[in-house]
Every structure is written in structure tokens, then in C-alpha cells.
């Protein structure tokens, strides 16, 4: 991820490319990337970014878990309000941010990696949310 500050980023251009997701959705994806990398590789920040690379599928699943950790049962409501209704929406946001230099990719990464990773209705069903939240509260 480059060290651009929010003031240097043309968020309107990114939104034109990816879709009219609100700015909060882009910040959520950036934060969710760190969350996912930490989940996959641990908290060890000594690894270079390229060695902490996650796949599109891993990122989608990490974003799902991050949303539930952040908002609990309200996770699907927040994502819906932002217009995020499928894993493909995550991919559009990610690749617009890659094109803007805010995220990096490997040569074999593709938008298709985000296609159909999970069904939002199933992943954010009451039963799945309750199970995930229950797992998070177990000591």
C-alpha cells in the first residue's frame, strides 16, 4: 500500500471507476485488508507487504468477518447501505484502489477472484451471524 494521504487521493475518480460506493466503504476495505492480513499471517509486521499478500477470496472472507466483528448483527445493514451486495462489489473497490496506487497486486490477481466467493444472504443470515458472534465471544 502506498503512503498517500487522504488529501492526495482523488476519491471521486476512484468512485467513478468502481461505482458510487461511499468513501466509508473504501476505508472499510483498506482497514479490512490489514485485518485479513493479520488474520492470515499474524501480527508480524516485519514481513514485507508482498509477503503478506492475500488472495481475492481470502480478502472477501476477511472482509465478511471484519464487518461482523465491527458491527455484529448490523453488518449486512451497513454493507447494504453502502451498496455492497456481493463479493464482486469488494473486487470493484479493490481494483479501483489498486489502479489508484492505494493497494498492490500480484500479476495473477484478477477481478474474477472476487466473483461468487460467498452468497451474501447466506453469509449474513441470522444463523451465520449468531454463530460468528458466538465464536468471537468464546474465551
Image: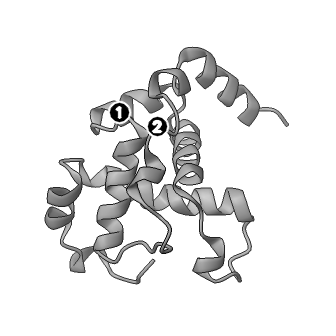
Mark 2 lies on a secondary structure that is: loop
Picture quadrant of residue 97: bottom left
> Which residue corresponds to the image point at 56% horizontal and 49% vertical from the top-left?
57
Is residue 26 in view from this perspective?
A: no
**Circle nearer the viewer, 1 or 2:** 2
Q: Point out the residue furthest to the right here.
A: 139
**Residue 85: assigned label:** 1
Residue 79 horizontal side relative to residue 11, left or right: right
Q: Nearer the viewer, residue 34 or 57?
A: 57
Neighbour tally class for label 1: few under 14, some 14-19, many 20 plus, Cα within 10 Å: some
Q: CA distance from mark 1 to mark 2?
A: 11 Å
> Which residue corresponds to the image point at 63% horizontal and 83% vertical from the top-left?
48
> Which residue corresponds to the image point at 69% horizontal and 81% vertical from the top-left?
47
Q: Position of residue 20 (x, y in %)?
A: 18, 48
Q: Position of residue 122 (x, y in %)?
A: 53, 21
Residue 95 horizontal side relative to residue 47, left or right: left
**Colour setup of the view:** one colour
Q: Point out the residue furthest to the top here.
A: 127
Q: Position of residue 98 (x, y in %)?
A: 36, 70
Residue 19 horizontal side relative to residue 57, left or right: left
Earlier residue among tags 1 and 2: 1
The correct choice, above or below, for 113 with respect to 139 in the image is below
Image quarter in which the N terminus is found: bottom left
Is residue 35 in view from this perspective?
A: yes
Mark 1 lies on a secondary structure that is: loop
Residue 124 horizontal side relative to residue 80, left or right: right
> Which residue corresponds to the image point at 33% horizontal and 38% vertical from the top-left?
84
The residue tagged 2 is 116
Amino acid at each position: 500500500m502506498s503512503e498517500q494521504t487522504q488529501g492526495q487521493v482523488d476519491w471521486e475518480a476512484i468512485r467513478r471507476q468502481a461505482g458510487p460506493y461511499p468513501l466509508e466503504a473504501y476505508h472499510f476495505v483498506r482497514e479490512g485488508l490489514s485485518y485479513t492480513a493479520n488474520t492470515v499471517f499474524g501480527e508480524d509486521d516485519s514481513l514485507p507487504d508482498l509477503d503478506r499478500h492475500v488472495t481475492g477470496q481470502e480478502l472477501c472472507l476477511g472482509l465478511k468477518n471484519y464487518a461482523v466483528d465491527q458491527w455484529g448483527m448490523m453488518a449486512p445493514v451497513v454493507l447494504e447501505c453502502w451498496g455492497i451486495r456481493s463479493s464482486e462489489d469488494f473486487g470493484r473497490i479493490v481494483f479501483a484502489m489498486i489502479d489508484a496506487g492505494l493497494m498492490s497486486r500480484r500479476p495473477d490477481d484478477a477481478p474474477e477472484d472476487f466473483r461468487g466467493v460467498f452468497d451474501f444472504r447466506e453469509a449474513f443470515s441470522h444463523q451465520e451471524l449468531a454463530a460468528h458472534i458466538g465464536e468471537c465471544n468464546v474465551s
